[in-house]
Amino acid sequence: MFDKVLVANRGEIAIRVMRACRELEVKSVAVYSEADKNSLFAKYADEAYLIGGPAPADSYLNIAHILEAAEESGADALHPGYGFLAENPTMGDECAKHGIKLVGPSGRVIEAMGSKIESRKLMEKAGVPVIPGNNKGVTDPDEALKIAESIGYPVIVKASAGGGGIGMRTVYEEDELIRALESTQSVAASAFGDSTVFIEKYVEEPRHIEFQILADEHGNTIHVADRECSIQRRHQKLIEESPSPIMTDELREKMGNAAVKAASSIGYTNAGTVEFLYSNGNFYFLEMNTRIQVEHPITEAVTGVDLVKEQLKIASGRELCCAQEDIQVRGHAIECRINAENPLTDFSPNPGKITGYRSPGGPGLRVDSGVYMNYTIPPYYDSMISKLIVWGRNRNEAITRMRRALSEYIILGVETTIPFHKAMMLSPNFRQGKLHTHFVDEYKQEITENMERIVKEDKEMVSRLKSTFLPSKRVAAVSAAVSSYMTHSMENNKK
């Protein structure tokens, strides 16, 4: 096992990796920007190094500065977390030049899976189902029209590089295609430095189901069950759960085998995720994420496998913790991403100072967070405050437990997505598991009306609580206010 691991990331994922290090009795090293000098993750680590200014290019994307910190600290491994440099194909080679082990797959694999066109070709070759479409870049409008006609409308125009739904355009009619082609090429060039786009059949109202993969350096590859990630907005996940409400043992075996085949065929190592679209009994390869996922805690909750520990063990040369037959799904887990965003204004970012904070507790509950009372959320990075994870013996218990947990979660000073999550837990269609990737848009009116009511109730209570805050802002006053707010929230939750 490693002696010291540098975590090349920030926020909750940095703390998550450092917790795994502590349990493995490995020292952790944080790197932080000037905007994060008062961050919790920098204080949590055994050592911390300033690596640059607030802009990601000056700090968390600056490989040279990060490796300088690694050398100075004597770290023998580097964990990239997710985002930033996690899927940079050159990172492994750069680490190797400095005698540092990257916790992740090889640069060759990252590069292959980072191209949607290349990954489609590889999956087809491996016998993994892919969505009908073309396997090369499209630049000529006439060629685009021929491809769309051959596979049938609607189609989706995608950037080959990048991810997160950036630049995707759905086209329902021939007249829209050329504009969509030009728009996607422009966005792709700006966002990823690569204007290559391709066209594939648009699967209407699909479910987004993914399989967690673990693969060691001794040829062993397994899947660690499934997750449903269909609740999204603008292709960004908001709520995830495990297992998928539609999953059966037979379907899990079929999709899981395809995921293992996908990983094995490219010589994958470490943790990764194979994502599928599922519709009308069929599933298709979507993409592979060559890193740990934001939503990994729900897999840990239902399988008991510590995925980050496994990442570190695999990178240090150890074999997998278990065989495929050892992976059992027990109960149900749900994760809500709590972001500093206003869900009533199209999820607009709302960075600022947290003036009141109390996280929920109780059975079956986990909060992965990187914030604290009086912490100022900087405007330079992702707006995530925390991830709220619950486990229940079944899906219904997990939903009711999430409702209870959300009612206890107090964050004052910034707008958050908590009202959205409260509204979702009240949605009859969500409770019945009738999910698809356009769920939020389809039931927007119902969700918005519930959010407006929830926000109004919460604001009225916060307004009444302000009188309890004394000018000196004593801790006792804050505690009393938050306790009163929690009591009110829990009473509302019972209604």
Image (cartoon, rainbow, N blue to C red):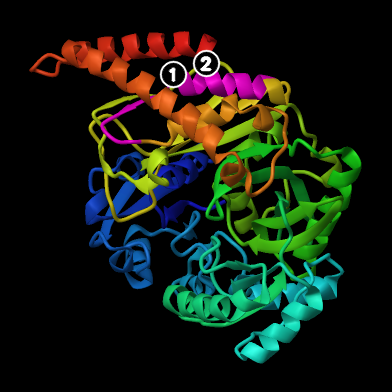
As drawn, 269 above or below 453: below
Question: What residue would you read off at disc 1?
Answer: 408
Q: Is residue 304 left or right of residue 378?
A: right
How many labels sit on residues? Answer: 2
Res 178 → quadrant:
bottom right
Question: What residue would you read off at disc 2?
Answer: 362
Front-most of 51 and 246?
246
Q: Residue at x 48, y 51 (%)?
A: 3
Few, some or many residues within 10 Å of mark 1 (<14, 14–19, 20+): many
Considering the numbered disc 2 on the image, is that residue within a helix, a strand or a loop?
Answer: loop
Q: Are marks 1 and 2 in contact (CB under 8 Å)?
A: yes
Q: Is residue 311 left or right of residue 67?
A: right
Question: Most extreme residue toward the right, as rendered?
Answer: 250
Looking at the image, tell me whether mark 1 or mark 2 is earlier in sequence order.
2
Question: Most extreme residue toward the left, as rendered?
Answer: 471
Q: Residue at x 35, y 69 (%)?
A: 62
Q: Main secondary structure of the magenta part?
A: helix
Q: x, y percentage for residue 360?
A: 45, 21
Amino acid under disc 2: Gly
As drawn, 292 above or below 470: below
Few, some or many residues within 10 Å of mark 2 (<14, 14–19, 20+): few
| 444 in magenta | no
As drawn, 6 above or below 225: below
Residue 215 in view:
no
Q: Which residues are magenta?
A: 397-415
Amino acid under disc 1: Glu
